[in-house]
Image (spheres, rainbow, N blue to C red):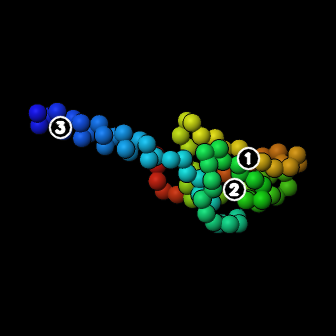
Amino acid sequence: MILRNIFHFIIITLLIISSTTQAEIVLDSTLGIKGALQGPDFAIDASLGKQVGANLFHSFASFNLNSSKSAIFIGSADINNVINRVIGGKRK
């Protein structure tokens, strides 16, 4: 009985944790604004970064997507490269 209750507690805890884990993309303010972007399908516009020549740079405090989410970088036709960095120290 006690083992069964412990097993149920573990299963419920894992379900709660997995259901609350969300995708997260947060700008770090190095190249513009600071703050979280809205998902689940994240549109990352060129205005959120900095364009230098044909390169578009973005800097994130956090960039965490699970398999059911997407991030799309949007910019003008003269952008050849999108270069990103993530400075947050958390690994998932």
Crowding around mark 2 (Cα neighbors within 10 Å: few <14, some 14 to 19, many 20+) is many
Q: Is residue 61 visible?
A: yes
Secondary structure beneath disc 1? strand
Residue 5 falls in image quadrant:
top left
Q: Say whether residue 46 is left or right of residue 88.
A: right
Along the viewing direction, whichever of 38 and 29 lies nearer the viewer: 38
Disc 3/disc 1 C-alpha distance (Å): 47 Å
Picture disc at residue 73: 1
Crowding around mark 3 (Cα neighbors within 10 Å: few <14, some 14 to 19, many 20+) is few
Lower position in the chain sequence, tag 3 or tag 2: 3
What kind of residue is marked 2?
Answer: His
Whether residue 51 is situated above or below residue 29 in the rendered picture = above
Picture disc at residue 35: none
Secondary structure beneath disc 2? strand
What kind of residue is marked 3?
Answer: Asn
* Residue position marked by numbered label 3 in the rendering: 5
What kind of residue is marked 1?
Answer: Phe
Residue positioned 78% across, 55% down in the render? 46
Disc 3/disc 2 C-alpha distance (Å): 48 Å
* Residue position marked by numbered label 2 in the rendering: 58
